[in-house]
Each structure stands twice: as structure tokens, then as C-alpha cells.
Amino acid sequence: MNIPKISVVMPVYNAEKYLDQSIQSILNQTYKNFEFIIINDGSTDDSIDIIKKYQKIDKRIFLINKKNAGISEALNAGIKISKGSFIARMDADDISLPKRFETQIKYIIKNNLDLCGSWIQLFQKSKLLNISKYPKNHEDIFFRLFFMTSFAHPTVIFRKKIFEKINYKNHLAEDYKLFCDISANNFKLGNVQKILLNYRVHFDQNSKKQYYDLWNNRKLHHQISLNYAKTVDKDIYKVTNQIFMKKIYNQKELNTLLNNLIKLSFKYNINKKNRYEIIQHAYSNLLYRNLAFYKIYLKCTKGFDRNLKNEIKMFIKSTPFFKLFKDLRGY
């Protein structure tokens, strides 16, 4: 009996509009040694019929049909029955490029990784949007996770041994929580520096809803970050706590915060581009900003290659007019 090397795990909930393309993108992979576990999470549309159609065509497809319980339980159910030594994530509305598995498996083995993602191309209908790029090296990913995600969830491939210690929690930010838990347990992380998945942007997608829910409850995201920092480095915990709890009230405090952040980035050997993005993220998270604060931010990021579009946004958010606009909007 041929044991699959990769177990592809894809939860499905009311995805009939896009499911054909997503399934076909997996079946058309150049790397063929995989099983395809599709978890129908209580869909009320025609998703189940589409899955069964492909199941008749390709014996690698295994269907789990269950009551709706959310993405975390669906993923855990699929991983539990998986046979492969690698677990590949896929979403029911995205499109994996043909060489995705081939490229990632080679990269994982070459670099002895436990978790590997890639860049993604965002698109909406037939229109290409921006490319989301994620850091390459373990050190940059490890450090960036203290502040923001370092992976595109639908692109990741895990070694199955990870799930002997960790699983998905029934959590609004289940992917970010999982990545922080994996990193805290000293697994080796990486990202292929290529686009291996086209990520569909649409307003009826579940992940889109979760994105807005998450930003309506930022404390949850911050708490995951703080718990991660607390288990790893008390100095990073102090910095992240200061950023997320909005405890910056004057120029001296901001200068100290950003310089401590820079020192920690050198301690963990973070590359220049990633250091710039993290400093920018820290500044943009401040509850209070003004032009004097912006000057300190500019000084601390001197010599970096700047993203002009983002810098204009940062400047505008530091002006009195933006604060007035926020006050008028009531947030």
C-alpha cells in the first residue's frame, strides 16, 4: 500500500462558488504523492455534491462530513486521520499554483524546516491586487511573530510531528495562535520566497469575516502575542506590552521604546527590512501620535528603504487633522 507523504487538509463551509477551482488546483499539482482530506463543516449549499463529484474521479480524496463546529475543529478532525508525514493546508476559495507542493517539500528538506509557507498573490475576480511577502529565515519569522503573523495560513506545510504537541485551538485567531505555539516550542520555521498560492479576496469569505472580527477585538490578538513573548524573552515581553497596552505618553518614552526594539532586533539577528516593518508596526499601534512623535520615528528608521505609500499614511496619522477626524468618528 502506498503511504502518502503529504496529507492535504481543507475545511469547506458553503464554498460552492469557488470549490471547483480550489480542488482542481490541488489535483493538478506536479507532486503527486498526497492524500486530500476535505472536511465539509456543515455546508448548507451544494459544496458536498461538488466534493463527491471529485471523489468519484480521484481516489486520493477522503471526505469527512460533519456538523458545523468551526475551522479549528474541522482542521483537527482532518489532521487526526491523516497518514502523511507532512500536513499541507488549503482553503476552499484559494488556488494553489501547480508546483506549490514540489517547491515546498524540496525547500523543507533542504533547510530542515518543520513549518514552511510562501508568498501569496491576492486577487479579486479577474483583478490582481498586491503581493503579500513574508520573511524567509527562522530568526526573522520568530521575532516578527511577537508583533504580527509571519505566514499566509493557506500556504503552510507542517511536519506532522508538530501536532503530537500542539493543535488548533477553537479560537478567533486560530492560525496566529498556532504559529506562536509552534515557534515557542522551538520548531524551525521558513517561507519560500515565491508566490505559490493565489489568495482570493471577497466579502463573503469566512476568513474575511474573521479578519474584521479580530480587529474589532484587538485585545485577543495582543494577548496571544504577549503570552508568546512571556514564554520566550522577558525583555521582548516588556516592549510588546508597552506597545499593545498603549503606554506611551511622551517623546522620551517613545524614543526609549523604539531604541529598545532596535536593540532586541539586533540581539535576534533580524534583517534590516524586517526591522523596519516591525518598527513601523509598533509606531502605527500607538494610541496617541503627533508630529513630534513622527520625527522620533523618522530618526529611528533613518537609513532604511522606505515604502512611500506607507510613510504617507504614517505622516497623515500623526497630524492633528487625523486626530480630529478620529474624534468626530468616535473611535
Image (cartoon, rainbow, N blue to C red):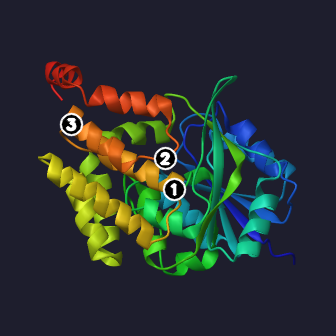
The residue that label 3 is drawn on is 292
Image position of 210 with respect to 258: above or below: above
Instruction: Kindly state the secondary structure of the residue where label 1 is placed.
Output: helix
3D distance between C-alphas at marks 2 and 1? 7 Å
Instruction: Kindly state the secondary structure of the residue where label 2 is placed.
Output: loop
- 223 vs 179, left or right, is left
The residue that label 1 is drawn on is 272
Q: Quadrant of the C terminus?
A: top left
Bin the neighbour count of mark 3 within 10 Å (Cα to Cα): few under 14, some 14-19, many 20 and up: few
Q: Position of residue 248 (x, y in %)?
A: 16, 50
3D distance between C-alphas at marks 2 and 3? 20 Å
Bin the neighbour count of mark 2 within 10 Å (Cα to Cα): few under 14, some 14-19, many 20 and up: few
As shown in the figure, which amino acid type bears the numbered disc 3?
A: Ala
As shown in the figure, which amino acid type bears the numbered disc 1?
A: Lys
Viewer-nearest residue: 270 or 224: 270
Q: Quadrant of residue 118?
A: bottom right
Q: Position of residue 255 (x, y in %)?
A: 23, 53
> Which of marks 1 and 2 precedes in the sequence?
1
Image position of 66 with respect to 129: above or below: below
The residue that label 2 is drawn on is 304
Asked if residue 178 can be seen in this view, the reply is no
Q: Say if mark 2 contacts mark 1, CB within 8 Å.
A: yes
